[in-house]
């Protein structure tokens, strides 16, 4: 755990939830958005690169359309998002412009992360925006993404953005002070946890509880986001948007909110993509020996250790690797299709060519294409 020396950070992702940009009526909360924009514009003036991930499209769309709460059906949500996204961008554009800052809208979907080419494309365009001195204003493209394929919440989205562009700091602004030892709305004795250095099962267990009426997140998605960031070398701070000048105070290292400190070993970029962004197409079960060789000795996955294959996948797809008891131990990109692995599982590498009639690789998953320590 380091000191809160956050002033040195240059690239900062800030995420605001629906409750921070909209009133319960679904109308924009101009007071809060104004304060957010002023703080971000000031950080920008200090030479920081700011990326804003904003929720509130569906919420403010519902407000504009006069709906009583968050819409239920997919088409209604999509329609509300189309309206609300425009409302939000109009306000951001206008307020940032007052401080001389240019913003650019970026609407992303799950495939922009799971498809490696689109992932790299998104990274290039964000880098170009930052180089132009633009503040990217990001949301999920709710109007075209149906629920089944959605990322669904902007906490995870903001962490994926942070890992995409190697941000140094991720600030998750919420309507709660941070992570507590119990639900502070129910238990008086609940204590704010100041620092988290490791994502233990105990920490994950603290994440129960749902979000507000208009948003979708809660502590669970914030913890998931922090986990991604911890592996990406990004410091995460969960803190309360209600607090005055809160972003500034976070950067100045004041003891506010909960800080999640990055793991000692930052995962390299491609492995982070395998672990957190790519879609899982199947599962490979391995025996005890192979599980140990992968986890402890940094070895590649050979056919001999494979006991079972689940799902139908192609060369280049990402799969989960599970130990004998079914628990996930790693994720990786396969060099053989599920059909071929079915035929060579349990066999020695020297027998691959005889069994398949061809041998392109010795290993089923090369260690460079394996993400461990999830
Ligand atoms: N993308 C959603 C919206 O703009 C918000 C998702 C979330 O609440 O995290 O309404």
Image (cartoon, rainbow, N blue to C red):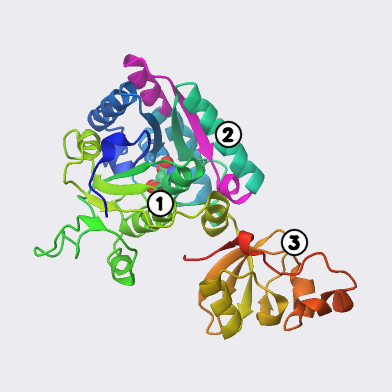
Disc 1 designates what residue? 229
Q: Is residue 98 visible to us here?
A: yes
Q: Is residue 307 visible to us here?
A: no
Q: Earlier in the sequence, mark 1 or mark 3?
A: 1
**Disc 2 residue crowd, few under 14, some 14–19, many 20+, Cα 10 Å:** some
> Circle 3 sits in a helix, a strand or a loop, which is it?
loop
* Residue at 55% from the left image edge and 73% from the top image edge: 297
Asked whether residue 351 is drawn in magenta, I would say no
Above or below, 108 against 349 in this view is above
Q: Earlier in the sequence, mark 3 or mark 2?
A: 2
Question: Disc 1 to disc 3, how far (Cα)?
Answer: 28 Å
Residue behind label 3 places its C-beta within 8 angstroms of ligand 1? no
Q: Measuring from the top left, give residue 82's x and y in whole percent.
A: 49, 35
Q: Which residues are magenta?
A: 89-115
Disc 2 designates what residue? 124
Disc 3 designates what residue? 315
Q: Is residue 126 left or right of residue 71?
A: right
């Amino acid at each position: 755990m380091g000191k809160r020396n956050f002033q040195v950070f240059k690239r900062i992702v800030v995420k605001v939830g629906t409750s921070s940009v909209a009133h319960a009526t679904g109308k924009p909360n101009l007071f809060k958005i104004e304060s957010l924009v002023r703080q971000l514009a000031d950080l920008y003036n200090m030479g920081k690169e700011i990326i804003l991930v904003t929720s509130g499209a569906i919420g403010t769309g519902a407000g504009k359309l006069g709906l009583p709460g968050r819409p239920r059906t997919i088409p209604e949500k999509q329609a509300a998002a189309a309206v609300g996204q425009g409302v939000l961008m109009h306000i951001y554009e206008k307020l940032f412009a007052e401080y001389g800052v240019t913003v650019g809208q970026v609407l992303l979907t799950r495939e922009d992360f799971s498809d490696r080419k689109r992932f790299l494309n998104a990274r290039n365009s964000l880098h170009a925006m930052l180089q132009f001195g633009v503040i990217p204003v990001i949301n999920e493209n709710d109007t075209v993404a149906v629920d089944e394929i959605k990322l669904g919440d902007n906490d995870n989205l903001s962490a994926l953005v942070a890992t995409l562009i190697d941000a140094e700091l991720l600030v998750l602004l919420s309507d709660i002070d941070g992570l507590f030892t119990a639900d502070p709305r129910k238990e008086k004795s609940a204590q704010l946890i100041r620092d988290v250095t490791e994502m233990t099962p105990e920490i994950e267990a603290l994440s129960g509880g749902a979000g507000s009426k208009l948003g979708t997140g809660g502590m669970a998605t914030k913890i998931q986001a922090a986990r991604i960031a911890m592996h990406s070398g990004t410091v995460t701070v969960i803190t309360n948007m209600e607090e005055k000048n809160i972003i500034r105070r976070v950067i100045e290292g004041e003891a506010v909110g909960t800080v999640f400190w990055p793991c000692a070993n930052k995962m390299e970029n491609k492995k982070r993509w395998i672990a957190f962004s790519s879609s899982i197409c199947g599962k490979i079960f391995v025996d005890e020996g192979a599980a140990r060789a992968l986890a402890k000795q940094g070895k590649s996955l050979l056919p001999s250790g494979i006991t079972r294959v689940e799902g139908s996948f192609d060369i280049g797809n990402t799969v989960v690797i599970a130990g004998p008891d079914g628990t996930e131990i790693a994720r990786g990109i396969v060099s053989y299709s599920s059909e071929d692995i079915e035929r060579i599982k349990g066999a020695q590498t020297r027998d691959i060519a005889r069994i398949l009639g061809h041998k392109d690789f010795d290993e089923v998953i090369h260690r460079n294409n394996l993400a461990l320590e999830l």
